[in-house]
């Protein structure tokens, strides 16, 4: 009965561990979006002095602090924990066979099963207690992560108000464009008179073939 109780506690804490891993994915995604929003506000804000700058930078610094705390709590909910699990089935089988062999040699084989049950009860209970302590600590940090994430979300939303007001009231500064050497650029360049192309002689006409009557005579020696 006690063995089944400790085994159920062990299984419950192991499932609880897996649930905590899945629960941490939500604040992780929200923090990724908040980090992008804080970086955007920092990069795009155009300081102009006055009360808006005081409100904006105060909110942004506070948001960065809360964001850092949320990231720290999230990391602590992930890392730094060592869970316990019972030995592998092959090891349990080998241990039980060794107990049976040992007590059979003593002439009390029934004590092997009792000793093995006590072994399981002890190991299930020890592992369940360690895993329960880890899960409780992780839940605490995960709750702190959620609270810090919600607070950071509110602060970023409040900081976006002076940012939006500054964007609406900002007047684009006209840019001065200076054109130099305008007169020299517009001065007509002197044209160089073109040299008339040289007159080429007409294409020579190729000579036609010469009709020769038989008997043939060598050229230049008429008969």
Image: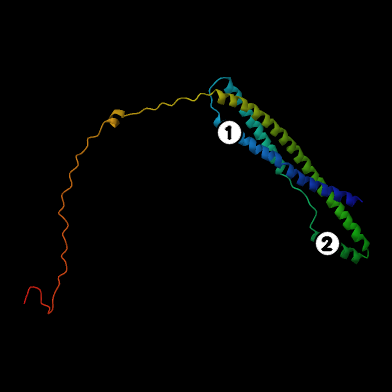
Compared across the picture, whether 99 is left or right of 80 comes to right
- Mark 1 residue element: helix
Which residue is rendered at x = 62% and y = 25% of the image? 161
Which residue is rendered at x = 62% and y = 36% of the image? 35
Q: Tell which tag, 1 or 2, sits nearer the viewer.
A: 1
In the rendered image of this protein, does residue 5 appear above or below residue 145? below
In the depicted view, which residue is nearer to us: 45 or 58? Answer: 45
Position of residue 87 measured from the top left corner of the image (x, y, whole percent): 79, 56
In the depicted view, which residue is nearer to us: 81 or 71? Answer: 71
Compared across the picture, whether 66 is left or right of 40 comes to right
Estimate how packed mark 2 is, as few (under 14), some (14 to 19) or many (20 or more) residues with alpha carbons within 10 Å: few
- Mark 2 residue element: helix
In the depicted view, which residue is nearer to us: 181 or 192? Answer: 192
Q: Which residue is mark 1?
A: 40
Estimate how packed mark 1 is, as few (under 14), some (14 to 19) or many (20 or more) residues with alpha carbons within 10 Å: few
Q: Which residue is mark 2?
A: 93
């Amino acid at each position: 009965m006690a063995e089944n109780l400790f085994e159920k506690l062990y299984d419950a804490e192991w499932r609880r561990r897996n649930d905590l891993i899945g629960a941490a994915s939500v604040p992780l995604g929200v923090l990724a979006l908040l980090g992008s929003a804080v970086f955007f506000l920092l990069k795009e804000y155009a300081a102009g002095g006055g009360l808006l700058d005081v409100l904006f930078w105060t909110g942004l610094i506070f948001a960065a602090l809360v964001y850092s705390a949320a990231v720290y709590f999230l990391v602590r909910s992930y890392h730094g924990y060592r869970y316990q699990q019972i030995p592998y089935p092959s090891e349990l089988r080998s241990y039980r066979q060794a107990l049976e062999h040992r007590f059979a040699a003593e002439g009390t084989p029934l004590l092997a099963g009792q000793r093995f049950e006590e072994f399981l009860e002890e190991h299930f209970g020890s592992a369940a207690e360690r895993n329960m302590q880890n899960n409780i600590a992780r839940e605490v940090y995960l709750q702190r992560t959620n609270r810090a994430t919600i607070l950071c979300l509110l602060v970023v939303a409040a900081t976006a108000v002076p940012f939006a007001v500054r964007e609406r009231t900002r007047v684009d500064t006209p840019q001065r464009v200076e054109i130099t050497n305008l007169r020299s650029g517009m001065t007509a360049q002197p044209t160089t008179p073109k040299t008339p192309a040289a007159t080429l002689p007409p294409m020579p006409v190729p000579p036609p073939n010469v009709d020769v009557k038989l008997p043939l005579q060598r050229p230049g020696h008429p008969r």
